[in-house]
Image (spheres, rainbow, N blue to C red):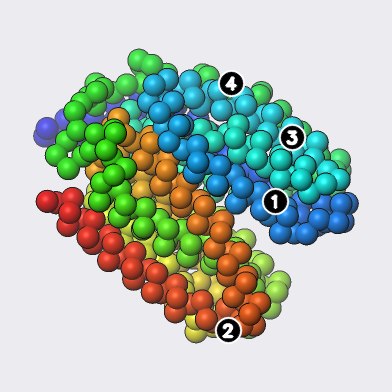
Amino acid sequence: MNGSEQVTSGNSEWARGWQTVVSGMFGCSLVALVPATLGIVLAPLEEAFGWSRATVSSTVFIIAVLALIIAPVAGRLIARWGPRRVALTSTMLSAFGFLAFAGAGGSEWTWWAASACLGLLSAAGGPIVWTTGVTRTFDRHRGLAMAVVLSGSGLAFMTVPIAALAILKAFGWQAIFLLFAALAVFLYFPLTWLWFAREPSSASPHLPAAAPAAPGKQEDRSAMMTIHFWLMALFVILVGAVEGALTVHLFPILKEGGIEATTAAAVISGFGIALAAARLLSGVLLDKIAAPLVMGLVIIGLAVSNLIAWQGATTLTGALAITLTLGFGCGGTTSSLAVLISRYFAASTYASVFGVLISTLGLCYGLAPMLAAHVHKLTGSYVALFPVFLGMLAGAAIILIVFAQKSKG
């Protein structure tokens, strides 16, 4: 394919698939609504029911555990029914999960049950289904398309907390989840119905519909038994744990470094912007260089953030450096993983493999902050964590190199 044909191919992908990308971005924002709201409802729930903040924040961990368990099933459903049907079903079912939160109260068990309810009903509606729609439409610009879709979570974190706070003050915390249920039914579902992965018009003539596995790719039944899969599993465990611990504890890390509380809060407010910007940048890079190289940049960003935090963020410049490099690192992980899986594994295995790996990433992201809090309680600071994190990132870099070498072979 010459240069003009490549441009035409890329343009035709966007002309054919932009609706899938936009609706997929909103779909990714749907699954981020509850995590983006937890910080707003922590204090009201604590005051109303006497729950600990750990009880409320455990929602992310519960959803991540269920997503990991259900991921293989979700992958098979997507492979059998197609991403469109699964997305529509999961979007509608999510409304009932939000209603469960609105009805929770009195007992901690009701909150945990609501978390489990949303986790079960929306397990197939995470990044796995929205990015699968992209893989069936985009090839030349797949990295950027996936990055735009995955930036939906950053969009949620930038907009939802402000709106949720206003609703909380006017109508109470239950109204937030009632609004989410209404949005799922009257906004997200119609948008998905109208735009997401419409067949056959969304299928690109440049992409084989059911091509056999390319060299180095694996068939469906054996993909999760390969060295490639297990290398990526170890990679996401290490990187996900570092990302989760640093992100959740970023505010106290900055304060312990000497940054005043108000200044630290202002600096952290830019994290969502850095996250979204990094995802878009990673998307552009993924269309130009190999996914393992972009993942290497992710490790560098996390390592730099960790090193500066270890030295102590005693100035505003240092605090901004920690936040921006952390946002850069976190922003590139998911999109790089999605593209890497789509390139190195057979198309028939994408939903299952990516679903398990992204769920593993989420599980480690939710578990690591609890472990970091325990270390802080024992030692009185976060200092002991930083050399451990650097060692974990070094291990992730070695794993990435081995993966790239084995993929060449």
> How would you rate the neighbour count of disc 2 (Cα within 10 Å): few for under 14, some for 14-19, many for 20 or more?
some
Amino acid found under the numbered disc labelled 2: Thr
Q: Which numbered disc, 3 or 1, marks the residue that appears first in the sequence?
A: 1
Whichever of labels 2 and 3 marks the residue nearer the N terminus, that label is 3
Q: Earlier in the sequence, mark 4 or mark 1?
A: 1
Circle 2 or circle 1, nearest the eye:
1
Q: Which mark is residue 38?
A: 1
Residues under labels 3 and 4: Cα distance? 22 Å
User: At which x and y percent is residue 262?
Assistant: 71, 71
Q: Look at 40% across and 66% down and name the residue there.
A: 301
User: Whole-Å distance between the Cαs marked 2 and 4?
Assistant: 49 Å
- Find numbered disc 3 in the image and state the secondary structure of the residue it sits on: helix
The picture quadrant where one finds residue 43 is bottom right
Q: How far apart are the two marked residues, 3 and 1, measured between alpha carbons?
A: 15 Å
Q: Of discs 3 and 1, which sits in the foreground?
A: 3
Q: Amino acid at mark 1?
A: Leu
Which label number is shown at residue 100?
3
Residue at the spot of label 4: 190
Asked if residue 371 is positioned above or below residue 279 in the image, the reply reads below
According to the image, label 2 marks what residue?
314
Answer with mark 2 or mark 4, whichever residue precedes in sequence: 4
The residue depicted at 71 percent of the width and 40 percent of the height is 113
Q: Is residue 145 visible?
A: no
Quarter of the image with the N terminus is top left
Q: Is 221 situated above or below 260?
A: above
Q: Residues within 10 Å of mark 4 (few under 14, many from 20)?
A: some
Q: Position of residue 94 (x, y in %)?
A: 63, 31
